[in-house]
Amino acid sequence: EKSLNRALSLVQDLSHLSNAPIYIFRAKLAMSSLYRKQGKFAQAETLAKEALVQIPNIKDSSDDHLMDIYARVATQLSNQGKFNEAVNLHQKVLDYRIKAYGPNNMKTLSTKQLLSYALIKTKNPQRRQKGIDTLNQVLPKLRTKSGVMSSSILQGESRLAQAYMEQENWPKAIEMINAAVTKFIQARGPNHPDTLRTRVSQASILGKSGSVDKAIQILQEVQPKYTQSLGLKNEETLRAMNNLGHFLNKAGRSTEALPLLEKVLAIKIDLFG
């Protein structure tokens, strides 16, 4: 984080140079990505918006370079909840990469994966189904190229489980999220933030499918680990606490749920006003 802040400061000191916008864009996006991984979503959002401001000022000499920028912008649009805009931009990048590299190139497959994520998040049922179908087509090819335990595969399988949850296809969602959790534990260890994040998704899927007690058990294991690794005033921690409070209340344990939900609210007011 310190190195990225220093790099950003150096780049901004050179803002008078003609190619400075591209470096400012990259540095701010890198900082945004780091903050997002740390669960500092407010800071991540601010830096992402500042990065996007640089787009009109970027003078790029290569279509390939420009597509890399578009891909990053599309990902940021998804992070901001602008999924239809992200879909359109990812599709533009995908059309270019299929033509430039072919349908089975790693860059093309990665773009398809990101496109599928954005499609799944839209409210349009046809687009959501297209995203699920696309992700199901892409994951086997990515497994062959990058291995079954790569980050892209693990995240893809977790996203696919959440997509099946949105469709209320509970058997498929539970099967996939349980497999994803097992793989994350094997690849990252039980206390890694990626593992904890996937277990929160697992709890959400189980709880919404009717296994409320199991969801509570998972969240009671995960929430202290989040607090220990990321701190209490972290949005990932707060999400786990909020979900735990929700499922406790759903289980009829309101005397346990209410203090927890009040604590989450108080911290959020302190952080965000």
Image: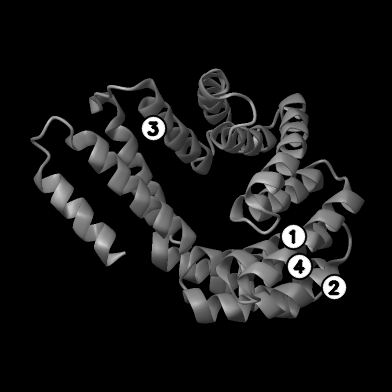
Q: Amino acid at mark 3?
A: Ile
Do the numbered discs 2 and 3 sit on residues whose CB atoms are within 8 Å?
no
Q: Earlier in the sequence, mark 2 or mark 3?
A: 3
- Name the one closer to the observer, 177 or 218: 177
5 relative position to 198: left or right:
left
Q: Residue 17 at x, y = what percent? A: 10, 34
User: Pointer 3 and pointer 4: residues touching (CB < 8 Å)?
Assistant: no
Quarter location, residue 166: top right
Marks 4 and 2, Cα distance to the nearest angstrom?
20 Å
Helix or strand or loop: what does disc 3 sit on? helix
Real-space Cα separation, disc 3 to disc 4, in angstroms: 34 Å
* Residue 245 x/y as whole percent: 69, 70
* Residue corresponding to mark 1: 180
In three-dimensional space, the C-alpha distance between marks 4 and 1, rounded to whole angstroms, equals 5 Å
Mark 4 belongs to which amino acid? Thr
Residue farthest right in this picture: 171
| Sequence-wise first label, 1 or 3 | 3
- Left/right placement of residue 11 relative to residue 141 reads left
Dot 4: few (<14), some (14–19), or many (≥20) neighbours within 10 Å? Answer: some
Q: Are marks 1 and 2 in contact (CB under 8 Å)?
A: no
Mark 3 lies on residue: 69
Front residue (pair 223, 182): 182
Q: Estimate the x, y position of residue 265 in percent, counting from the top left.
A: 53, 67
Q: Quadrant of the C terminus?
A: bottom left
